[in-house]
Image (cartoon, rainbow, N blue to C red):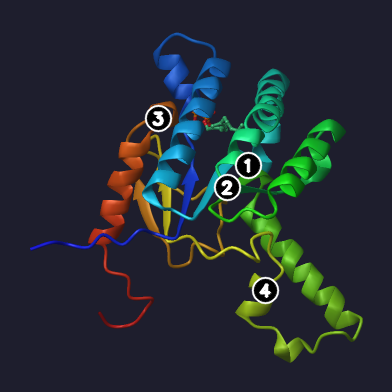
Amino acid sequence: MSTTVTTPTHVAIVMDGNGRWARARGLPRAAGHRQGAEALRRTITGAGELGIRYLTVFGFSSENWNRPAGEVQDLMGLMRHYLRSEIADLHAKGARLRVIGDRSRFDPDIVALIANAEDLTRGNDKLNLTLAISYGGRDEIVAAARALAADAAAGKLDPKSIDAAALTGRLFTADLPDPDVVIRTSGEKRLSNFLLWQSAYSELVFVDKYWPDFGKSDLEDAVHEFNRRERRYGAVG
Ligand code: FPP
């Protein structure tokens, strides 16, 4: 008897535990983030090999701006490096890059690197990689509600026509399917303001490893876990 494995269309990941990975080795937190970037590289390759079409990763939350200035600088440096060094490879692999979050707090050169990367890869569809950076789920929903309210106030929208689809259409993720699976590493079991609206029916998979140790086999395990779950969307199974 053979069992068919359903590949989730969209996998989203809270990449957690870089700091603890470094501390466990007596290394500075920056070393954990560097290894975290390596894990991201492995995971993107693994997702492509497994046929996952959409991968969204939480790289930096709106709350992460409150970390010590040195760590924020390290993370921004890593992002700069990532956007410069990885983009040609992503493009060659047929990946499209999107960045979701509040760009207004980034240095102008990072804003420009993001815009260039998005423009370069806009025509690709093999893997849709979305980096959530300076991202917060509540802020995203508030901005969407505000946009709908502004249209209603301007007489462009009948408030009675506002439904879930209308709000979905105003999110950063308007052109992405909802995640089938949300993975969080490091043993923490929270969403921490990640894709709050979009994960209403996602399967949550918690992995006991720190993010720098994550790789393709962990992604495969999550796909198998997803296959073991029965998704009912509130209906009877
Ligand atoms: C969580 O670990 C991780 C982050 C806040 C940053 C994630 C960044 C990377 C994976 C680097 C590569 C990313 C990009 C977009 C280039 P933590 O620092 O909260 O770890 P801790 O909870 O153990 O302290």
Mark closest to the chain's N terminus, 3 or 4: 4
| Residue behind mark 1 | 91
For mark 2, give the secondary structure. Answer: loop
Mark closest to the chain's N terminus, 4 or 1: 1
x and y, in percent, of residue 112 in the image: 83, 38
Disc 4 residue crowd, few under 14, some 14–19, many 20+, Cα 10 Å: some
| Residue behind mark 2 | 94
Identify which residue is drawn at 66% across, 66% down.
Answer: 174
* In the image, residue 72 above or below residue 170: above
Residue lying at the far top of the rendered structure: 26
Q: Say whether mark 3 is within 8 Å of ligand 1.
A: yes
x and y, in percent, of residue 99 in the image: 68, 47
**Please, what is the three-letter code of the amino acid marked with disc 3?**
Tyr
The reply to whether residue 87 is visible in this rendering is yes
| Residue behind mark 3 | 210
**Please, what is the three-letter code of the amino acid marked with disc 2?**
Gly
Quarter of the picture holding the C terminus? bottom left
Q: CA distance from mark 1 to mark 2?
A: 5 Å
The reply to whether the C-beta atoms of the residues labelled 1 and 2 are less than 8 Å apart is yes
| Residue behind mark 4 | 167
